Image (tube, rainbow, N blue to C red):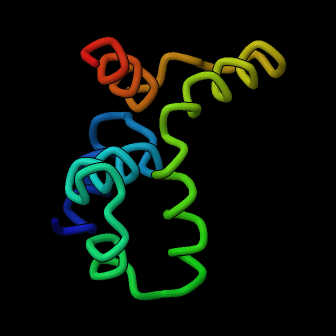
Amino acid sequence: MKVSKELKYAVDNGISPVEHMLMMLDKVSKGGDAEVVASIFGDKQVLEFIRPMLANMDDYPHQTQHLARRYGFRAKSPLCVAIQRRRAAR
């Protein structure tokens, strides 16, 4: 995965770069495999964010919808939709 290419894709398509990268990392790391994530991001601070985020991806849509209701922003992000589809397929 080329991070710069994926970030450009997200920006060019109006997708949140952070959410797009989390989707790509979840996909590439097969749900957050620690070794795969560490091989992509060796920086300790980045890993301290990414590991728990990937481990709790199923809760992300709920949190996003809660914040959207509270602060009035878009709740149906591509990441939330992808997580909800993955949940439904189980």
Q: Position of residue 30 (x, y in %)?
A: 23, 52
Task: Pick whichever, 36 or 18, lies toward us.
Answer: 36
Q: Position of residue 72 (x, y in %)?
A: 75, 16
Q: Is residue 56 left or right of residue 38?
A: right
Q: Position of residue 76 (x, y in %)?
A: 49, 17
Answer above or below: position of 54 versus 38.
above
Q: Locate the C terminus and report the quarter of the image it occupies.
A: top left
Residue at x 33% of width, y 25% of height: 82
The extreme left residue here reads 1
Q: Locate the N terminus and report the quarter of the image it occupies.
A: bottom left
Q: Is residue 24 left or right of residue 41?
A: left
Residue at x 36% of width, y 57% of height: 32
Task: Pick whichever, 4 or 77, lies toward us.
Answer: 77
* Count of labels in the image: 0
Q: Is residue 18 left or right of residue 88?
A: right
Q: Please identify the quarter of the rendering in which residue 6 is found.
A: bottom left
Q: Please identify the quarter of the rendering in which residue 86 is found.
A: top left
The extreme front residue here reads 90
Q: Position of residue 40 (x, y in %)?
A: 29, 77
Answer above or below: position of 78 versus 30.
above
Task: Pick whichever, 74 or 57, lies toward us.
Answer: 57
Task: Pick whichever, 3 or 86, lies toward us.
Answer: 86
Residue at x 32% of width, y 49% of height: 31
